[in-house]
Amino acid sequence: MKVSNYYNQNKYNPNFTAIRIVKTSPDEFLHFANNYKNFYKKNFVFRAQSYEQSLFFEHLKTLAVKENASQKWVINNAVRYKLIDYDTINNLPMCVFTGKDIVKLTLYNFKNMIPNFIRSAKFSANAAKNNFPKHLVAAKAIKETVDSDLPRFQKFLKKNNAKYVTYNEFLQEIKTGNLDS
């Protein structure tokens, strides 16, 4: 009886590991966001190496609006000042958190919020002292925080059994119902 309950539970709830790191191109990510809107909205999906890095990219988008400039101009500026490079932008993975792993990610972010804020403040002060372009000081501070936190995020993914898949494998998991929130 116990074995059959275990089998049935896993058969009908196949989402044992609900973290996927998906190798995607920018076009594949847009395709996914546009064609799998319900899945995208119900789960936590971002295209970056870590949650913190996704905040960095969101900051760049906000900066473009604030500076009344195009996103392309801001990205080119960030590349010019070595905050990012085009290769990195084109090769970012899509991170997908479903089910209980959304809660785990939320707790991870909450736990690291204050230390990351303190680090970011220190990095910001250093960037300002070193005559970094004023409009990119906050971006530089966020980027340095991202870089310092990346090993911790990788450890978090490993601890929580993140599965690394290709874009086609990921879509197949969704289509067959093996990955659902």
Image: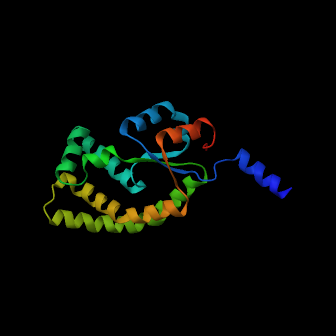
Residue at 52% of width from left, 55% of height from top? 162
The picture quadrant where one finds residue 173 is top right
Give the color scheme: rainbow, by chain, secondary structure or one colour: rainbow
Residue at 83% of width from left, 58% of height from top? 2
Q: Quadrant of the C terminus?
A: top right
Residue at 63% of width from left, 43% of height from top? 178
Q: Considering depth in this image, is 120 or 105 the residue closer to the camera?
A: 105
Residue reaching furthest to the top: 35
In the picture, measured across the screen, residue 161 lies left or right of residue 74, that is right
Q: Position of residue 161 (x, y in %)?
A: 55, 58
Does residue 176 lie above or below 105 as drawn? above
Does residue 114 lie above or below 172 as drawn? below
Q: Considering depth in this image, is 80 or 123 the residue closer to the camera?
A: 80
Q: Considering depth in this image, is 151 or 106 the residue closer to the camera?
A: 151
Does residue 8 lie above or below 108 as drawn? above
Q: Quadrant of the N terminus?
A: bottom right
Q: Position of residue 163 (x, y in %)?
A: 53, 53
Q: Position of residue 141 (x, y in %)?
A: 27, 60
In the picture, measured across the screen, residue 2 lies left or right of residue 109, that is right
Count of residue discs: 0
Q: Position of residue 64 (x, y in %)?
A: 25, 42
Residue reaching furthest to the right: 1
In the picture, measured across the screen, residue 41 lies left or right of residue 16, that is left
